[in-house]
Image (cartoon, helix red, strand yellow):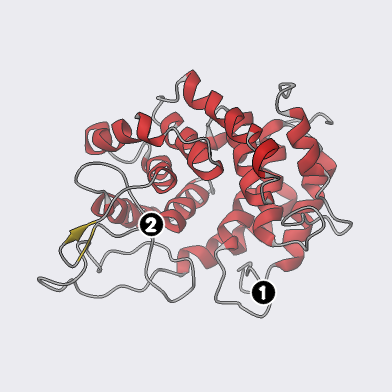
């Protein structure tokens, strides 16, 4: 059952469902595949509205190209980062096994651009390590790499070598004092700062793939008061990142509800933000709940 505190927010999410099964980016707006995928993941995690979840998955299947990718816009096939989200949405349902296999194959075959590391170069990280990019053919970054790891690791034939390479990339991008940002450590002589959402992505992707000691400083950063902002991405991925290491305290989970309540002041969140918050709240921060098989109940 969904807690009564979350129910109005799930109802608001369901109101954004469109006749073709997709979800609008916001009330009255057009749909986009990332909004559709995150909505399906949140509803599945909450065990709600199975007919809407199935319709959303079908909508994503209609957007999939023959090579397996799901582009954010049909006219921009290189912007295929929603492929990972579509794969995550399809994984619990065997009816979409073919779509999931094709998406996983495309994802495993596409890597971020990389080049030999230059001594005394402007970047602090190892540019020769391989992960996943936002845009096909560009450099690898933290959040798309972590999401691809989470998606591919949940498939039946996970590409171990690619995931192991991504682990090396994420550990290389970890900041010396803990945490991650979008994917740079040092630029010229300046060490950059971490942000909660990127740190949460990285910790969720690394859980079970590295020793706790290698990320202890990042866990301490994410659990600390500087990451307690009740904003959508920070709150959601703080919960996902800490729960992956069994460190999501009640206060961390309560912060998800606090972030949802801020819509009363700042207005409704866009669908991907709202759905990520709801997915984290409904699952208690356990990302695996977004892709596991389950029975459903209606909202």
**Residue farthest toward the top in the current orientation of the protein:** 250
Residue 256: x, y in percent?
57, 31
Instruction: Name the residue carrying label 1.
Output: 66
Residue at screen point 42% across, 63% down: 132
| Quadrant into which the N terminus falls | top right
Q: Secondary structure at mark 2?
A: loop
Residue 146: x, y in percent?
43, 51
Q: Secondary structure at mark 1?
A: loop
Q: Classify 10 Å Cα crowding around label 2: few (below 14), some (14-19), many (20 and above).
A: some
| Quadrant into which the C terminus falls | top right
The quadrant in which residue 275 appears is top right
Residue at screen point 38% across, 65% down: 140
Residue at screen point 85% across, 55% down: 18
* Front residue of this view, candidates 275 and 270: 270
Q: Is 275 on the left-hand or right-hand side of 183?
A: right
Q: Are marks 2 and 1 in contact (CB under 8 Å)?
A: no
Instruction: Name the residue carrying label 2.
Output: 182
Q: Is 104 on the left-hand or right-hand side of 31?
A: left
**Residue farthest toward the left in the current orientation of the protein:** 119
User: Number of numbered discs present?
Assistant: 2
Residue 199: x, y in percent?
38, 44
């Amino acid at each position: 059952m969904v807690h009564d505190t979350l129910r109005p927010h799930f109802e608001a999410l369901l109101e954004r469902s469109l006749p073709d099964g997709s979800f609008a980016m916001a009330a009255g707006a057009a749909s986009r595949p990332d909004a559709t995928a995150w909505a399906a993941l949140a509803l599945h995690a909450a065990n709600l509205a199975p007919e809407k979840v199935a319709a959303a998955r079908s909508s994503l299947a209609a957007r999939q190209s023959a090579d397996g990718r799901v582009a954010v816009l049909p006219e921009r096939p290189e912007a295929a980062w929603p492929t990972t989200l579509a794969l995550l949405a399809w994984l619990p349902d065997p009816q979409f096994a073919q779509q999931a296999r094709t998406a996983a194959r495309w994802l495993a075959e596409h890597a971020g651009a990389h080049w030999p590391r230059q001594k005394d170069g402007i970047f602090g990280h190892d540019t020769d390590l391989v992960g996943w990019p936002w845009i096909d053919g560009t450099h690898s970054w933290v959040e798309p790499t972590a999401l691809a790891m989470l998606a591919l690791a949940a498939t039946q034939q996970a590409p171990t070598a690619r995931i192991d390479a991504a682990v090396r990339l994420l550990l290389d991008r970890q900041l010396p004092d803990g945490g991650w940002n979008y994917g740079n450590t040092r630029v010229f002589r300046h060490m950059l700062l971490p942000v909660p959402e990127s740190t949460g992505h990285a910790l969720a992707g690394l859980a079970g793939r590295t020793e706790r000691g290698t990320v202890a400083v990042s866990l301490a950063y994410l659990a600390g008061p500087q990451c307690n902002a009740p904003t959508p991405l920070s709150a959601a991925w703080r919960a996902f990142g800490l729960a992956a290491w069994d460190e999501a305290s009640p206060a961390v989970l309560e912060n998800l509800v606090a972030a949802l309540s801020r819509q009363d002041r700042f207005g409704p969140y866009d669908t991907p933000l709202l759905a990520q918050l709801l997915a984290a709240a409904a699952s208690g921060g356990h990302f695996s709940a977004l892709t596991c098989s389950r029975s459903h109940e209606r909202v």
